[in-house]
Amino acid sequence: MARTPRPRADQGGGLPLAAGPLAGLMGAVLEKGRPFRFEARGESMFPAIRDGDVLTVAPFAGRGPRPGDIVAFVHPETGGLRVHRVVEAAAGRFVLKGDNALGADPAVGPDAVLGLVVGIERGGRPRRPGPAVLAAAAARLSRTSWYTRLARRLRRALRRPARGGGA
């Protein structure tokens, strides 16, 4: 008799979930007015959000996304969950871009935007997404290719092991 494979929990006790089902689950929780926490994967928002950070996403409280906000949304081409910064809001559409990405995502409507990132936890310590003025400046800067190249160099430099003389 063949055994049915069971999902295995990762070391943190959670079950891995693909981006599409995760987006559906997040949307259902946020529709009930509750915040949703999950572990971020990827480096598109480096240095603001790093791979492995735990994010708290909350429903919008009577307002829509504004430039500088970090939002969770359903990518229009892949149907997967993404967390990127709003760089432009016009005519009911939003242009979103990862701080560490060279190009922006396709513009999305308000129905694709699930919620607002209100908390970042790194290494068990809470961090704030940052003041709105700095976030708006980062959104404007992230539209430039030099900023993205600088962020990538910084990421590589932080990953390199320290070079030092041996004992």
Image (spheres, rainbow, N blue to C red):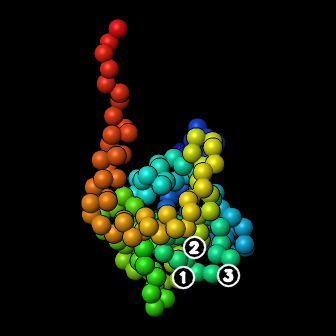
Q: What residue does disc 1 label?
A: 111
Specify the amino acid type for callout 3: Gly
Mark whose residue sits in front, 3 or 1: 3
Q: Give neighbour class at mark 2: few <14, some 14-19, many 20+ (Cα, 10 Å).
A: many
Q: What is the number of the mark on residue 4?
A: none
- In x, y percent, where is residue 44? 40, 58
Of the two numbered discs 2 and 3 on the same chain, state the one appearing first in sequence: 3
Does residue 37 show up? yes
Q: Is label 3 in contact with label 1 (beta carbons under 8 Å)?
A: no
How many badges with numbers are in the image?
3
Q: Residue furthest bottom?
A: 91
Residue ID at (49%, 88%): 92
Q: Is residue 127 left or right of residue 77?
A: right
Please identify the residue farthest to the top as the structure is shown: 167
The residue under label 2 is which amino acid type? Leu
Residue under numbered circle 3: 62
Q: Position of residue 16 (x, y in %)?
A: 55, 51
Q: Residue at x 36, y 58 (%)?
A: 100
Quarter of the view holding residue 167: top left
The image position of residue 5, as x and y in percent, is 55, 46
> Quick check: 53 left or right of 150?
right
Disc 2 and disc 1: Cα gap in Å? 7 Å
Circle 2 sits on which residue?
Answer: 114
The type of residue carrying mark 1 is Asp
SS at mark 1?
A: loop
Helix, strand or loop at label 3? It is: loop
Question: Which of 130/10 is in front?
Answer: 130
Q: CA distance from mark 2 to mark 3?
A: 13 Å
